Image (spheres, rainbow, N blue to C red):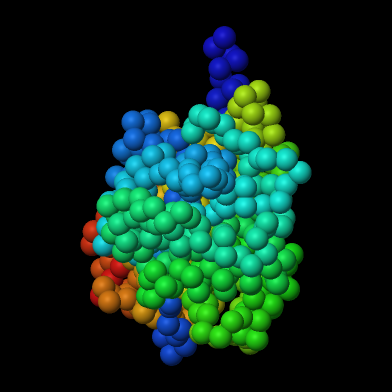
Amino acid sequence: MILRSKYLSLAAIFVFGIACSSGAQDAKRYEIKIDRSKSLVSKSTPTLQVVVNPMLLRGAPMHDGSFEALHALGADYVRYVPWLPYPRQAVAELEEPKDGHTSWDFSHIDPTLEDFMKATEGHSVILNFSTIPAWMYKTAKPVTYPTDPNEVSWDYTQGTELRDPSMKEVAGYFVRLLSWYTKGGLTDEYGKWHESGHHYKVAYWELLNEIDFEHHWSPETYTRFYDATVEAMRKVDPNLKFVALAMAIPGKSPEMFAYFLNPAHHRKGIPIDFISYHFYASPGDDQTLDHWQFTFFAEEEGFLNTVRYIETIRKHYAPSVKTDLDEIGVILAEDGKENAQPGKYVAKDEPPAYWNLAGAMYADLYTQCARMGIDVIGESQLVGYKSQFPSVSMVNYKTSKPNARLLILKLLHDNFGPGDKIPDTTGGDSSLTIQAFDTKEGHKLLLINKRNRGQEVTLPSDVGSYRVSRVVTSAADSIETAEAQSRRSLKLEPFEVAVLTWK
């Protein structure tokens, strides 16, 4: 036993020596240079979306922690989406009006929205009641839905043709939703008033979600729907602004952007305030964290090429229209396997470092989009959990505390925003993003380690005493902050996102 231990110790020393030698050969210290003679001005706001699900209901295990975290973040442009898997929590009129009676029912909708509005009070929100009542569509047979508001139903959005081609019926539905939340109630199809007591200030309304998936809208039909609905809703609130499209895979449907953004295809006087579209990195089932550190950023680069192309279309047809990338995240293959086998398969836990890596990808995308002039970059989503896209969650679904993805968003939110100057910054490579910002609070430097290994940078000589705030894998439940640093050399942990601030 003693002899064996001796040989193991010698072997360990030998292996350690090789590792150190290899590390010494491979290690690269990045020297950062900032050129303030070449600067852009940021228009970009970092934010997130909140998708309605049972864990956000009052009394649910994740309710309190999630809304506390949302309130503490204090973000603008927060997107709120009652969505199709839970028809009773997303659709306020589940049955067709008939014989003088209607089915308007907000009892499973209002409580969560009320908690959301309270958590975001003082900040702008984007409401998106994305699911149209199924009875408004032509279908082979009536679409059914669970009686239990917490039971998942993935096939509610059936049909591709509205039964009312004039669009007045569907526009009326959204008019009544808006009235319910901003005017104290709604007048139903038979002229009866239903009191809500709500007088919320809603800055933005996004019309539908992932229209290339849900009901498979054509550019012509969606544009007619948008015009009819916007025209009707503006009679309720002339100051309401609108977000359009919310495309799931924008790179596959450039014709949607070209058609919709062309003013010639719209009614006179119909505004387009924002367009929106989405991106999720989707690694293969046979990949691990070692692969993800490359896959996430490779897929991100492909998406950024799509953004550049859509920006060319937008600037050609409608340069005053803004862009909201309102679903940015990662969906692991385990989530898809779980959704394909409901009740039979449970997704494996994500490796702890995954949350930092996914957050690093969002931080990198925010940086690249800020340089491109994108207005809003929204991370997806506040709450996910087993059976409901757990890898997308920004709150730890076991502890109900912010995970690294939400902490990194907060780090960006608290340090960067519209009006920042973005000077030309060099020193990184494909494994490390380095970007300087000049803000009202002083000079800042954003560092994003994209790799599952430590890295080291040398700071510019004009950086004085600085404060560093960072999110690291070794302290996954908080933002670490250290004051009055003066080291010229700075080491970064694997997947670390750090912000340096100095005067």
The image quarter in which residue 18 lies: top right
Q: Residue at x 35, y 50 (%)?
A: 194
259 sits to left or right of 190:
right
Q: Residue at x 31, y 50 (%)?
A: 196
The image quarter in which residue 276 lies: bottom right
- Residue occupying the far front of the picture: 99
Residue 474 x, y percent position in the rendering: 41, 41
- Residue occupying the far right of the picture: 140
Q: Does 149 sit above or below residue 440?
A: above
Q: Does 422 sit above or below residue 71?
A: below
Q: Residue at x 39, y 75 (%)?
A: 238
**Closest to the observer: 351 or 392?**
392
The C terminus sits in image quarter: bottom left
377 sits to left or right of 23:
left
- Residue occupying the far left of the picture: 484
**Closest to the observer: 332 or 224?**
224
Residue 236 x, y percent position in the rendering: 39, 69
Residue 67 x, y percent position in the rendering: 33, 45
Q: Does 9 sit above or below residue 470?
A: above
- Residue occupying the far bottom of the picture: 37
Q: Does 31 sit above or below residue 70?
A: below
Q: Residue at x 56, y 17 (%)?
A: 5
The N terminus sits in image quarter: top right
